[in-house]
Image (tube, rainbow, N blue to C red):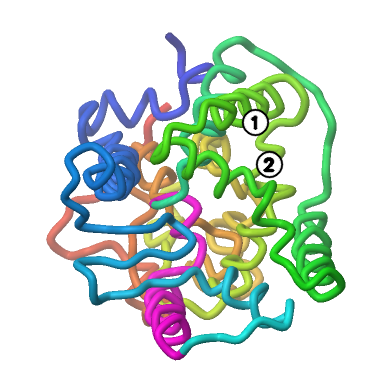
Amino acid sequence: MSAKTNPGYDAVQVKGWLTAHRWLILRRLSQIGILTLFLIGPLTGYFLVKGSIASSLTLDFLLLTDPYILLQTWIAGHTIEATALIGALIVFTAYLLIGGRVYCSWVCPVNVITDAAHWFRTRLGIQGGIKFSRKVRYWMLGMTLIVAYSTGILAWELINPVTVIYRGLIFGIGWAWGAALVLFIFDLLISERGWCSHLCPVGAFYGTLGKFSILRILAVRRDDCNDCMDCYAVCPEQQVISPALKGAKHGLDPVIRAGACTNCGRCIDVCALKVFEFGSRYSEPSVATGQPESEPELKKVA
């Protein structure tokens, strides 16, 4: 399989398959692990975690609440209990530190479905489809809040694919598999990365929070970039890469600061030249742009 149809081909040759898929593997383990925690109760009768991804109770004392759910609840006019507020604050703080859209790439089960659709789309050579503006998701976010305010209920959560699929996996609701199939076909045949990267209001909410997060991906060796475009091919939010990777001539630092970045780490995986790595938004430019003294200069891969 060539590099054109398999982004990261050169990285596998240089770093080995395991290293070239390290962050992808860790994300899948995270997604499966979180789902498993919820499944243990219904399967064994011993509930480590009760509830769902929207609101959960761990070990009967730690209540965690999705801040987006809490916001809809408050706008709908419902009373917010102190425990729910504390739970939302814990989640809010965690995402503020590590990047709001890590929810999308490290927690959300829909990510597995849409990633699979993109994988098949790339290998089948499917082109074209509907092109949505990435701003649409912010309109979607606004509409969910307006509907909650107007109706007094969390109307979006009744049809939210994330909620529907997660509850279906945990509680065995058969039609949830239908929702998963619809999303897969939508991203495969109708719109490339249409749901997660263009329409999902959950991603818009956490993307807004992610603008201020501390954990960031840095193009630390951007001078070594050979324009292979593999990072763009695998990135679900391609527009976030250019300012950090190609912004040196405009005086921009190598930190990917956009809230839309999911911190998925795929750009790190597929880059044979090790241009990217995780770091802090406060990294000094002189440190972030230089070659580490302990590592020899990397040769460019054709």
Circle 2 crowding by C-alpha within 10 Å: few under 14, some 14–19, many from 20: many
Q: Are marks 1 and 2 in contact (CB under 8 Å)?
A: yes
Q: Is residue 159 visible?
A: yes
Q: Please state the extent of the stretch shown in magenta in the rendering.
A: 82-106
Q: Label for residue 183?
A: 1
Q: Position of residue 121 (x, y in %)?
A: 61, 19
Q: Quadrant of residue 273?
A: top left
Which residue shows up at 76% across the image and 53% down it? 134
Residue at the front extreme, as displayed:
45
Q: Is residue 206 left or right of residue 217?
A: right
Name the residue at 70% across, 31% down. Answer: 192
Q: Find the distance from the CA under tag 1 to the CA under tag 2.
A: 7 Å
- Residue at 33 percent of width and 62 percent of height: 278
Name the residue that disc number 2 marks. Answer: 195
Horizontal and vertical percent position of residue 261: 54, 59
Q: In the rendering, at what x and y percent does residue 32 appear?
A: 30, 40
Which picture quadrant has residue 208? bottom right
